[in-house]
Image (cartoon, helix red, strand yellow):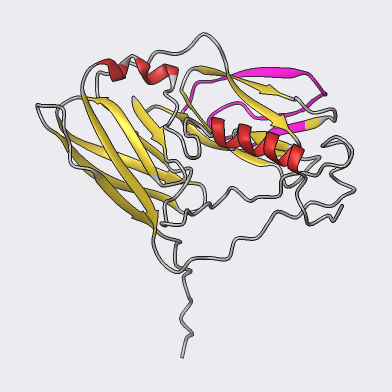
Amino acid sequence: MNNGSLSLGCLLATSFLTTLMLAGASLGQEPVKDPASAAAAKKGGTVTGSVKFEGELPEIKDLVVSAKSASGCCPPGEEVDRKDLSLVIGKDRGLLGVVVSVKVEGAKVEIPEKPYELDQKGCRFTPHLLVVPKGAKVAFLNSDETSHNVHLITVLNEDLNQTVLAGKRLERTYNEPERIKVTCDMHTWMKSWLVVTDATHWAVTDEKGQFTLEGLPPGEHEVSLWHETLGSKTAKVVVGEDGKAAPLEVQMAKKKKKTRRRRR
């Protein structure tokens, strides 16, 4: 089989699970409701919106995965999914994987007893982006037949750099809000993000760039948006006494590179 082609079995299994679980958003489906924010959604208004890419569309290249380094990642005859999820732009410029959050003073977030799960399947992290409330427990799983090294470089939370053998798992609790990059030193193309948030309401955009925030009280709220490649942005939204709000439309673009002026 050509190394540039994607095997249907491994690709479909990995891609389906990745998109289905992508931090509360599934491609082509309604966003999955997070158990921690379910209680907050029982009362209050709903804000819908979309986030779209602004500017010239970039060329998106596949991840570089050599046959040697991918040995043991998939069953014989199958290959690793090489799709780069760090910047996924839909056909209508919708941005996949934007974390949209609001912090409401006095609102409480229920921390699930069951750990959130970040799995490794076909030598890809699943989901690519996982949002959890501060104080939550995260389980790092290895569903592959090869070992992985889960490496998190943190600032506010405890660092993690540990091998997870095939079929095993390890758990950690994250108490400080922080955006944490997750990598595997054994398979360098493997990257994902663990976003520990102190927000009370959050959602992740789907492949159309759409999101829904539920349970917001009446009034004006500051909305924080973050994307792993495009950075951060804020917006304002007003929820009426009837619980309704105008759709929020946001655009995000690549940061312009700073150019140094030559001294004369």
Residue lying farthest top? 113
Residue lying farthest front? 8
Q: Is residue 173 magenta?
A: yes
Number of numbered discs on residues = 0
Residue at 27% of width from left, 15% of height from top? 42
Residue at 25% of width from left, 34% of height from top? 47
Residue lying farthest left? 241
Where 144 sits versus 171, above or below?
below
Image quarter for residue 161? top right
Residue at 28% of width from left, 49% of height from top? 249
Magenta segment: 149-176
Q: Is residue 83 magenta?
A: no
- Front position in the image: 99 or 28: 28
Q: Position of residue 259 (x, y in %)?
A: 48, 75
Q: Position of residue 202 (x, y in %)?
A: 37, 31
- Front position in the image: 137 or 116: 116
Residue at 25% of width from left, 18% of height from top? 106
